[in-house]
Image (cartoon, helix red, strand yellow):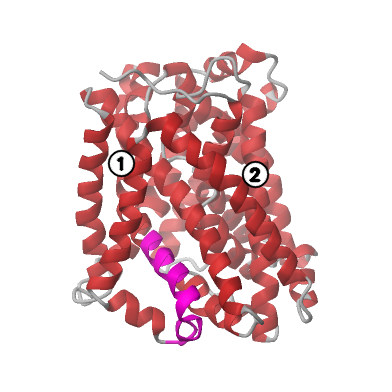
């Protein structure tokens, strides 16, 4: 069995965990949800939930990982033998997400290259549709993205994940700040800035809260087993509460800046039409290239933006793969390289199926959804909230909150201890249950959110 990797220090852990959290959810899902649910009021609700609900779940997962020194596949069984099955469920989430996340990462890689060489062509309405419906090119870029992800994970925690995170995360932050400054100083952006930053309380609804709460899972890599995995690599000398706050600040800052970058830009391009901030791939791969094409030096600005998204997608795909590889190493005692190769071979096969679902297999659907959309629905609308809710149940009523609190207090008092207990036992599971039910009803058209 290989010796368990550890992060060299708190900075490496925080940047790696923040890199996991900062992904496609921050850079396209957060802005379109903010636009859809009232701009400033959505931002305010999200910030409140991030420092309360998000904090509690992240502390829980990191503490479970460090307490057990195991991947999620084995960690829940170590806490309580009867709940070992929850570890399998938690590991199934990244197993399901990994193939299609890397496929989308391949799309981002393609667009990064396209903005440098053919920015005008990329702004055409049919460009994205023609690309994803092709056979060879999407698979090539998907394989490139998958290969880079695999190589970083094979190098391990210190030489791979931590080293790359120390380079990419500060660079990602610098590019985000630079692009945000450029966008907000452009003429015509004021209306978008005002919409994004000024809360309109008349737009506040339960749907706004549910949408913001659901976004937390995407933005903070919660209920995917990732934070448990990274927590298992964290030294007992590090302060979990402080580290969690730092990860939250980094992650929320990137999401905030993404909104500040994208909403004013699309507002200016569309003349204030919020519908231009549509959900899904159309925002990033159809609308934004058009926006960049209207700007001076738009090709360069667009390339910088997609470089930013590529960095974010890569750090997240690395963490998703690491969560799976860590479980295989713990359970089957194989070498890291063997585990990574096995998972990536699986990812290549299923990712290829997802890609062909937009092309030669586009007529094949599952309950009316494309293969990728179905996998996204199962993972994000069912398993993410289900694992999050059951984790709260295990901590709140099976092993009891003191098991987590004692781990957090190895490095000093847990300042939010009483708040933590109330959240993890009652408030968090009830709200997550609401997300689970609403997500399923929404996907079947019974509820419109």
Vertically, is 52 above or below 405? below
Vertically, is 259 above or below 22? below
Q: Quick check: is 112 in the magenta stretch?
A: yes
Q: Which residue is drawn at 73% across and 69% down?
A: 182
Q: Quick check: is 23 in the magenta stretch?
A: no
Q: Which of 392 and 339 is in front in this view?
A: 339
Left or right: residue 51 versus residue 427 is right
Q: Nearer the viewer, residue 12 or 422?
A: 12
Residue 166 disc label: none
Query: Over which residues does the magenta segment extend?
Result: 104-125
Q: Where is residue 144 in the image (x, y as percent from the top left)?
A: 32, 58
The residue most toward the front is 117
Q: Quadrant of the N terminus?
A: top left
Say if residue 353 shows up in the picture: yes
- Quadrant housing residue 247: top right
Q: Which residue is drawn at 64% across and 51% down?
A: 173
Q: Which residue matches tag 1?
A: 92
**Mark 2 neighbour density, 10 Å: few (under 14) some (14–19) many (20 or more):** many
Please, what secondary structure does the residue beneath circle 2 have? Answer: helix
Q: Which residue matches tag 2?
A: 250
Q: Distance between the residues labelled 1 and 2?
A: 27 Å
Please, what secondary structure does the residue beneath circle 1 have? Answer: helix
Q: Position of residue 201 (x, y in %)?
A: 78, 63
Vertically, is 124 above or below 359? below
- Quadrant housing residue 139: bottom left
Q: Where is residue 221 in the image (x, y as percent from the top left)?
A: 49, 44
């Amino acid at each position: 069995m290989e010796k368990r990797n550890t992060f060299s220090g708190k900075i490496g852990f925080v940047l790696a965990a923040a890199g996991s959290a900062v992904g496609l959810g921050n850079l396209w899902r957060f802005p379109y949800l903010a636009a859809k649910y009232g701009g400033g009021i959505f931002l305010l609700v999200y910030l409140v939930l991030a420092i309360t609900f998000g904090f509690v779940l992240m502390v829980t997962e990191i503490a479970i990982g460090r307490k057990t020194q195991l991947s999620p596949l084995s960690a829940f069984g170590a806490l309580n033998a009867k709940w070992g099955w929850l570890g399998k469920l938690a590991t199934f989430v990244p197993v399901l997400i990994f193939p299609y996340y890397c496929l989308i990462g391949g799309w981002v890689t393609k667009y990064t290259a396209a903005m440098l060489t053919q920015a005008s062509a990329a702004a055409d309405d049919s460009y994205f549709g023609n690309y994803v419906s092709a056979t060879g090119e999407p698979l090539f870029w998907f394989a490139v993205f998958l290969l880079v992800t695999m190589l970083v994970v094979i190098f391990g925690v210190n030489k791979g994940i931590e080293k790359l995170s120390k380079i990419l995360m500060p660079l990602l932050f610098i590019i985000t700040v630079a692009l945000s400054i450029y966008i907000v100083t452009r003429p015509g952006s004021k209306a978008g800035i005002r919409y994004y930053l000024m809360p309109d309380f008349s737009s506040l609804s339960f749907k706004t809260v549910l949408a913001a709460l659901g976004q937390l899972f995407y933005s903070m890599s919660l209920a995917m087993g990732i934070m448990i995995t990274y927590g298992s690599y964290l030294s007992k000398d590090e302060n979990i509460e402080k580290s969690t706050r730092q990860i939250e600040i980094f992650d929320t800052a990137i999401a905030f800046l993404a909104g500040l970058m994208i909403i004013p830009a699309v507002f200016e391009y569309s003349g204030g039409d919020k519908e231009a901030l549509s959900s899904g791939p159309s925002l990033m791969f159809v609308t934004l290239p058009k926006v960049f094409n209207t700007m001076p030096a738009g090709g360069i600005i667009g390339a910088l933006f997609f470089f930013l998204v590529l960095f974010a997608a890569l750090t997240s795909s690395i963490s998703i793969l690491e969560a799976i590889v860590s479980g295989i190493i713990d359970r089957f005692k194989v070498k890291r390289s063997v585990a990574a190769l096995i998972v990536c071979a699986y990812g290549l096969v299923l990712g290829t199926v997802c890609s062909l679902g937009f092309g030669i297999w586009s007529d094949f659907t599952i309950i009316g959804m494309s293969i990728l959309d179905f996998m996204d629905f199962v993972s994000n609308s069912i398993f993410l909230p289900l694992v999050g809710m059951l984790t709260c149940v295990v901590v709140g009523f099976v092993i009891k909150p003191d098991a987590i609190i004692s781990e957090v207090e190895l490095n000093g008092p847990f300042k939010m201890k009483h708040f933590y207990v109330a959240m993890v036992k009652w408030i968090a599971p009830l709200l997550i249950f609401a997300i689970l039910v609403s997500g399923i009803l929404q996907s079947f058209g019974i509820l419109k959110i």
